[in-house]
Amino acid sequence: MGTYRTSDLYLSAYLKAKGLRLIDKRRDGNKFVFIFDDRQDRKDLIQEFFNDGMVNITAFKSAIQDLKTMVFNV
């Protein structure tokens, strides 16, 4: 299905907590871009995120920590 890319840390954490598989990260200037395996429901998940979507707080916190570790341990 392809990939989905975003530099938004919190959106990335939300998507990861919702089960999207993170496959890579890349530096783009002074930002990092997180690259996910795309899924058919990805657009719905993004809409949920921007409309106060619910996610398990432990999974969200863990996803943020994982992403920050990836960025700062390059």
Image (cartoon, rainbow, N blue to C red):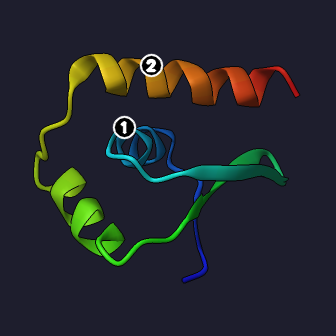
- Residue 6 drawn above or below residue 72: below
In this picture, residue 71 sits left or right of residue 66 = right
In this picture, residue 72 sits left or right of residue 64 = right
| The quarter of the displayed image where residue 14 is located | top left
- Residue 34 drawn above or below residue 4: above
> Which secondary structure lies at badge 2?
helix
In this picture, residue 2 sits left or right of residue 19 = right
Given contact means CB atoms under 8 Å apart, are the residues at marks 1 and 2 in contact?
yes
Specify the amino acid type for callout 2: Ser
What label sits on residue 17 in the rendered view? 1
* N-term mark: 1 or 2: 1
State which quarter of the image contains the C terminus.
Answer: top right
| The quarter of the displayed image where residue 72 is located | top right
Give the residue drawn at x 74%, y 51%. Answer: 24
Residue marked by disc 2: 62
Residue 56 makes an appearance in the image: yes
Q: Position of residue 3 (x, y in %)?
A: 61, 73
